Image (cartoon, rainbow, N blue to C red):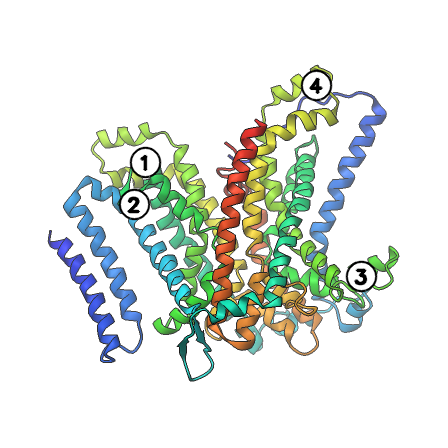
């Protein structure tokens, strides 16, 4: 009981702090509110244990993560929806100004944003190519080979390396127009003018390659795990029945691998939707915004004009699109897997 | 669900010729892809020892094509002859490096603690918060994975400014924790599910409390999973660029931001960039080689049922 009231007191404290901030006799920053929230969380936990005994102890497992996530996600997102409706330039003195749906109308007629969305479609489609390569690599690693561990470590390497370093290593120096080894190789192969980042279409492909280089291992490892979890009896049975390797793959391995494949592809798409750092560091959206992903575009939009309001509106629209898209994707995947099996 | 090295016994040899061609093809493909994976790393490391001429002429092999030199490392203050002299670049580098270490270790630890607790609760007990049941709560946590960083970045920029957490390591740690929490919960749920409940029931009969059973019985068994989740979280935090670029400026800048900020400026110093990139990737490369087993374990958790 005492602890429950303590929790209540802490909440009231938050309220008071909030009020005093409004009346400008409070603290300099909002930080005390954060402390009060933490305190309130602790009090809530203690209160749970004291009032509800065993049940409270159980709730205590979940409470920290739940309180943390709510504070870090729900509140900022709601706040984000609010600032999306304002014209707020952080570097100007005028401060925040509520302007309703102006940002929204501006967004609808923004060709760069539309272009960035279109690019995201292309980038997501590239996942299918990555999937094919990753599947091939997983099959290779699952074959009867020597030095499997060595190859697995090597193949996993790109995933460990920071995308920023990667974009420097590959994007800025290997693909350097004048002397980068990749450009030299391309010249030897008969491409006279190997400029990887000046033609819009080629630049997009280059970005896809950079991103694929980092993330193919991720899908590869998941698919490899799937291959190794597959029962060997089925494969042997197929062989005994006289199926060729090709037939075995399409009629046994591939269908059995579908659930894992779907998981891998969906996870990869989710990661792909966050793609930003490679683009920011290699092309910074160029040439002329052609390679921009939504994330990198918003980043540049903020960096160039420091308009928080408009940037947030773009981000929120993106969030809505993503949530709808991923939900649809999950539904589709569910039905797909069920139909095949 | 770790990836085991299983040897296939069904190597049915149809004819020696086709066997050899398939061997050649398999090893050819393996070596080819290994080259693709390793060449950029090789290129970066060697470039850090090159001088300008060697870079612009595309020399590749040390001692044959060009004479290696400590040039890149000297500019970082990390070459043998400059390591004992004072160097502002080196000081900055170490500061960034420590920022990266502190934020990624801090965030991963925090995520592991609250993440495993939540995952344990979700696998063992039935909860009901208002109309939210276990499945809804799990889904709530996992759905955070979809949330792209951009959505949170700008609100957090404003909020952190108000709260006074902008450009602090604590601010970054909190965000990174949020970023890796769904992954940790995902992995740990899989781990706890694989531990039989009877173990804890026996412990409870022996007079341990719920939390006692968790710390004394379950934790030690789930430790490999925790290590796996920790390492995966470390990798993600160490490589994170987007939040760090937006939310830090002078004090809490991390290594990726430092690397990225070098590229933009006047004409690139290839050698020093290469040295910096090498230093940025080295810790993870070591972790990757040494703890590859755990990484794979973390990545494949829950993927194969």
Circle 4 marks a residue in which chain?
A
Q: Position of residue A27 (x, y in %)?
A: 26, 77
Q: Which mark is residue B37?
A: none
Question: Is label 4 in a helix, a strand or a loop?
Answer: helix
* Residue at the spot 51% in from the left edge and 34% down from the top edge: B1
Neighbor class of circle 1 (other Cα within 10 Å; few <14, some 14-19, many 20+) is few
Using the rendered image, report if marks 3 and 1 lie on a common chain.
Answer: no
- Is B216 placed left or right of B294 in the picture? left
Circle 1 marks a residue in which chain?
B
Q: Position of residue A300 (x, y in %)?
A: 57, 70
Question: Is label 1 in a helix, a strand or a loop?
Answer: helix
Q: Position of residue A203 (x, y in %)?
A: 72, 61
Alpha carbons under labels 3 and 2: distance apart: 55 Å
Using the rendered image, report if marks 4 and 2 lie on a common chain.
Answer: yes
Check if mark 3's residue and mark 4's residue have beta carbons within 8 Å.
no
Using the rendered image, report if marks 1 and 2 lie on a common chain.
Answer: no
Give the mark nearest the N terminus, 4 or 2.
Answer: 2
Q: For the view shown, which residue lies furthest in the bottom direction?
A: A93
* Residue at the spot 15% in from the left edge and 58% down from the top edge: A6
Check if mark 1's residue and mark 2's residue have beta carbons within 8 Å.
yes
- Residue receiving disc 4: A239
- Residue receiving disc 3: A183
Question: Is label 3 in a helix, a strand or a loop?
Answer: helix
Neighbor class of circle 2 (other Cα within 10 Å; few <14, some 14-19, many 20+) is many
Q: For the view shown, which residue lies furthest in the top direction?
A: A241
Alpha carbons under labels 4 and 1: distance apart: 43 Å
- Residue receiving disc 1: B124
Alpha carbons under labels 4 and 2: distance apart: 50 Å
- Residue receiving disc 2: A61
Circle 3 marks a residue in which chain?
A
* Residue at the spot 51% in from the left edge and 68% down from the top edge: A105
Check if mark 4's residue and mark 2's residue have beta carbons within 8 Å.
no
């Amino acid at each position: 009981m005492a602890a429950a009231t303590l929790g209540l007191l802490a909440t009231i404290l938050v309220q008071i702090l909030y009020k005093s901030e409004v009346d400008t006799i409070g603290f300099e920053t909002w930080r005390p509110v954060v402390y009060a929230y933490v305190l309130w969380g602790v009090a809530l936990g203690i209160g749970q244990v004291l009032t509800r005994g065993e049940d409270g102890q159980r709730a205590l497992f979940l409470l920290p993560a739940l309180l943390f996530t709510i504070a870090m996600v729900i509140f900022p997102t709601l706040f984000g929806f609010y600032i999306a409706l304002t014209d707020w330039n952080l570097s100007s003195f005028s401060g925040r100004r509520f302007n309703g749906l102006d940002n929204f109308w501006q967004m609808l007629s923004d060709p760069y944003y539309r272009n960035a969305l279109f690019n995201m479609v292309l980038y997501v489609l590239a996942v299918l190519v990555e999937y094919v390569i990753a599947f091939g690599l997983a099959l290779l690693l699952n074959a009867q080979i020597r030095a499997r561990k060595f190859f697995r470590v090597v193949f996993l390497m790109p995933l460990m390396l920071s995308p920023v370093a990667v974009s420097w290593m590959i994007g800025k120096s290997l693909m350097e127009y004048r002397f980068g080894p990749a450009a030299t190789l391309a010249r030897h192969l008969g491409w006279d003018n190997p400029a990887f980042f000046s033609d819009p279409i080629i630049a997009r492909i280059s970005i896809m390659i950079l991103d694929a280089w980092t993330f193919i291992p991720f899908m590869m490892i998941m698919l490899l795990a799937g291959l190794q979890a597959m029962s060997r009896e089925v494969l042997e049975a197929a062989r005994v029945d006289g199926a060729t390797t090709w037939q075995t793959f399409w009629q046994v391995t591939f269908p059995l691998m579908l659930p894992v494949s779907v998981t891998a592809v969906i996870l990869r798409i989710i990661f792909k939707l966050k793609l930003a750092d490679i683009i920011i560091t290699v092309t910074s959206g160029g040439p002329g915004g052609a390679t921009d992903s939504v994330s990198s575009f918003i980043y540049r939009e903020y960096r160039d004009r420091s308009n928080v309001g408009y940037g947030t509106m773009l981000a929120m629209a993106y969030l809505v699109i993503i949530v709808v898209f991923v939900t649809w994707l999950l539904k589709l995947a569910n039905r797909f897997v069920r139909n095949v099996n | 669900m770790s990836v085991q090295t299983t040897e296939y016994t069904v190597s049915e040899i149809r004819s020696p010729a086709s066997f050899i061609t398939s061997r050649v093809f398999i090893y050819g493909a393996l070596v080819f892809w290994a080259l693709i994976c390793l060449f950029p790393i090789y290129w970066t490391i060697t470039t850090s020892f090159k001088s300008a001429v060697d870079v612009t002429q595309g020399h590749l092999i040390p001692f044959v094509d060009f004479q290696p030199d400590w040039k890149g490392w000297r500019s970082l203050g990390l070459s043998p002859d400059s390591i004992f002299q004072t160097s502002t670049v080196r000081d900055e580098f170490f500061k960034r490096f420590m920022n990266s270490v502190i934020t990624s270790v801090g965030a991963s630890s925090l995520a592991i603690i609250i993440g495993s607790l939540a995952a344990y609760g979700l696998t063992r007990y039935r909860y009901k918060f208002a109309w939210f049941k276990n499945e809804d709560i799990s889904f709530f946590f996992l759905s955070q994975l979809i949330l792209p960083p951009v959505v949170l970045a700008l609100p957090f920029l404003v909020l952190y400014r108000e709260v006074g957490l902008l450009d602090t390591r604590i601010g970054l740690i909190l965000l990174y924790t949020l970023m890796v929490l769904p992954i940790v919960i995902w992995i740990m749920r899989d781990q706890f599910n694989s531990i039989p409940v009877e173990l804890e029931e026996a412990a409870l009969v022996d007079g341990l409390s719920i939390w006692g059973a968790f710390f004394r019985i379950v934790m030690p068994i789930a430790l490999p999973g925790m290590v796996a989740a920790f390492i995966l979280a470390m990798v993600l935090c160490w490589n994170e660029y987007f939040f760090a670029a937006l939310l830090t400026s002078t004090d809490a800048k991390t290594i990726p931001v430092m690397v990225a900020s070098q590229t933009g400026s006047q004409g690139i110093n290839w050698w020093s960039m290469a040295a910096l990139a090498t230093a940025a990737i080295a810790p993870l490369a070591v972790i990757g080689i040494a703890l590859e087993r755990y990484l794979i374990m973390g990545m494949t958790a829950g993927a194969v049922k």
